[in-house]
Amino acid sequence: MGAPDTVAYCHCRDCRRVTAAPVAAFAAFRNRDLRLIPERDKAKTVTEGVSRWFCPDCGSQLMARFDYLPDQSYVPLGILDQADQLPPEVHCHAASALPWLHIDDALARVEGTARATLRR
């Protein structure tokens, strides 16, 4: 797996729900840098326009792909061995952050997705 194009926090409701956390953290990789095993790795559509892959054993989310970003895959930081070396660079959907969540960092905040921050 190569270096991610971006690493981001996501505050949108869908990501909070699918990760069961008050904020999600993902690394965006190019699809060609990831390998899926078709007979084991089957996508599920939880939200229209988003395909998500889950571990068949524990149910943890492994990856998500968005229809409007066909060449990108988003992998939760919590499942990556090198998560400690991938600090988030931006807060996406910042306006959707839970009101009690105190964000005390200097990272950029965008109202939409991390799409504009992708390094290509």
Image (cartoon, helix red, strand yellow):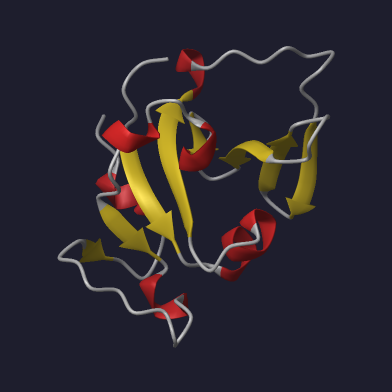
Residue drawn 48% across and 14% down? 32
Residue drawn 23% across and 73% down? 104
In the depicted structure, whether residue 99 falls above or below residue 104: below
Query: In the drawing, does residue 69 fall left or right of residue 21?
Result: left
Q: Which image quarter is the N terminus in? A: top left
Q: Which image quarter is the C terminus in? A: top left
Residue in front for this viewpoint, 56 or 116: 56
In the depicted structure, whether residue 41 falls above or below residue 85: above
Where is residue 103 drawn, in percent x and y? 30, 74
**Where is residue 44, by image quadrant?**
top right
**Where is residue 4, by image quadrant?**
top left
Total numbered badges shown on the rendered structure: 0
**Where is residue 13, by image quadrant?**
bottom right
Where is residue 80 drawn, in percent x and y? 48, 29
Where is residue 74 drawn, in percent x and y? 51, 38
In the depicted structure, whether residue 47 falls above or below residue 2: below
Q: Residue furthest left?
A: 106
Residue drawn 59% across and 13% down? 35
Residue drawn 49% across and 64% down? 23
